[in-house]
Amino acid sequence: MHTTSRHIQRPTDRDINATAQNYEGIPGLIRKYYGITPDGRSLAGIYLWESVSAANAFHTADWVAMATKRWAVTPQRQDWETPMVVESAERRLVAAQ
C-alpha cells in the first residue's frame, strides 16, 4: 500500500463538500481523508492507495493543474510506503501485499 498527501491553503467546508464525491470509485484508491489544521488555514488530502502506480495514475500533471486552478495554489505532494494499516474499530490489521 502507498499513502500520499496533498497540502493546500484556504479550504472551506463548501470546497470539501463539492469535491468529495469526485473520489468515489477511483481505481486503486482505498480511502481518502480530508484534514484541516486547527487554525483552518490549510487542508491535507490524505490518500491510501493500493500501490504507488495507482497514486501516480491519478495524480497526473492534469490533476495538479485542475487542483491548482480550484485552490489557487499548487498542492504539495508527500509520499509514504504504507506497510500496515490498523483498523482499530474492527480490531483488524491490514498488511500490504
Image (cartoon, grey):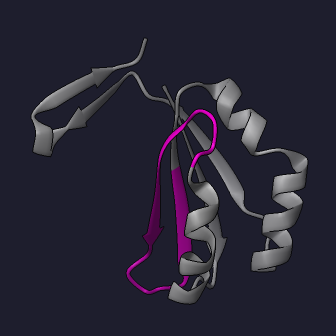
Counting from the top left corner in percent of width and height, residue 6 is at 63, 57
Residue depicted at x 62% and y 85%: 10
Residue depicted at x 82% and y 55%: 63
Residue depicted at x 53% and y 64%: 44
Q: Is residue 30 left or right of residue 67?
A: left
Q: Quadrant of residue 89?
A: top left
Farthest-out residue, top: 97
Farthest-out residue, front: 25
Q: Nearer the viewer, residue 61 or 90?
A: 90
Q: Is 27 drawn above or below residue 63 in the view shown?
A: above
Q: Which residues are magenta?
A: 25-46
The reply to whether the magenta stretch includes residue 5 is no
Tally of marks: 0
Q: Is 22 drawn above or below residue 5 in the view shown?
A: below
Residue depicted at x 21% and y 38%: 87
Q: Nearer the viewer, residue 80 or 57?
A: 57
Counting from the top left corner in percent of width and height, residue 81 is at 50, 27
Q: Quadrant of residue 92?
A: top left
Q: Is 57 drawn above or below residue 24 in the view shown?
A: above
Counting from the top left corner in percent of width and height, residue 52 is at 64, 27
Counting from the top left corner in percent of width and height, residue 11 is at 59, 82
Q: Quadrant of residue 88?
A: top left
Q: From the image, which quarter does the C terminus lie in?
A: top left
